[in-house]
Image (cartoon, rainbow, N blue to C red):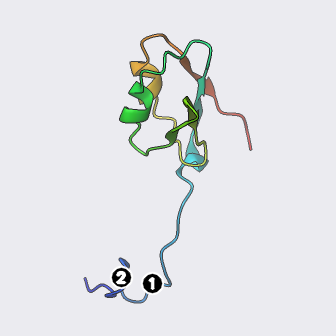
Amino acid sequence: MKFKTKYIAPIGADGIHTINTGDWRIKRPVLDQEKCIKCGFCFLHCPVNSIKRIDGQFIINYEYCKGCGICANGCKPRAIEMMQEVEK
């Protein structure tokens, strides 16, 4: 397959498009800031980097979160709970 030299896209593609991967999620992680011990497990293990540290708190970007549950499964204080996704 040949690629354009300036972009990482196949020849004939009209450009690079971003897709909000959170669109197909059926469960969402909900973070309880009171229970969070700020260990960073969720931040370090999120496969799509949808968890950011802002002003000392971890914030989940639901536009890109796939709802895989890795953050909730590894959270020792159980500060993250997987909840059923509400219809958009």
Give percent across and percent down for residue 11: 37, 88
Q: What's the residue at 50%, 84% (across, down)?
A: 14
88 relative position to 20: left or right = right
Spot the residue most to the left: 1
Q: How many numbered circles are shown?
A: 2
When asked about the image quadrant of residue 61, the answer is top right
- Image quadrant occupied by the C terminus: top right
When asked about the image quadrant of residue 80, the answer is top right
Q: Tag 2: residue type?
A: Pro
Neighbours of disc 1 within 10 Å: few (<14), some (14-19), many (20+): few
Q: Are marks 1 and 2 in contact (CB under 8 Å)?
A: yes
Q: What's the residue at 57%, 40% (across, down)?
A: 25
The residue labelled by disc 2 is: 10
86 relative position to 31: left or right = right
Of residues 52 and 8, which is closer to you in this image? 52
Q: Secondary structure at mark 1?
A: loop
Q: State how far apart marks 1 and 2 are (Cα).
A: 6 Å
When asked about the image quadrant of residue 83, the answer is top right
Neighbours of disc 2 within 10 Å: few (<14), some (14-19), many (20+): some
Give percent across and percent down for residue 77: 47, 10
Q: What's the residue at 38%, 79% (across, down)?
A: 9
Q: Tag 1: residue type?
A: Ala
Of residues 24 and 45, which is closer to you in this image? 45
- Image quadrant occupied by the N terminus: bottom left
The numbered mark at residue 21 is none
Q: Is residue 19 above or below residue 40?
A: below
Q: Is residue 38 above or below residue 28?
A: above
The residue labelled by disc 1 is: 13
Give percent across and percent down for residue 57: 57, 29
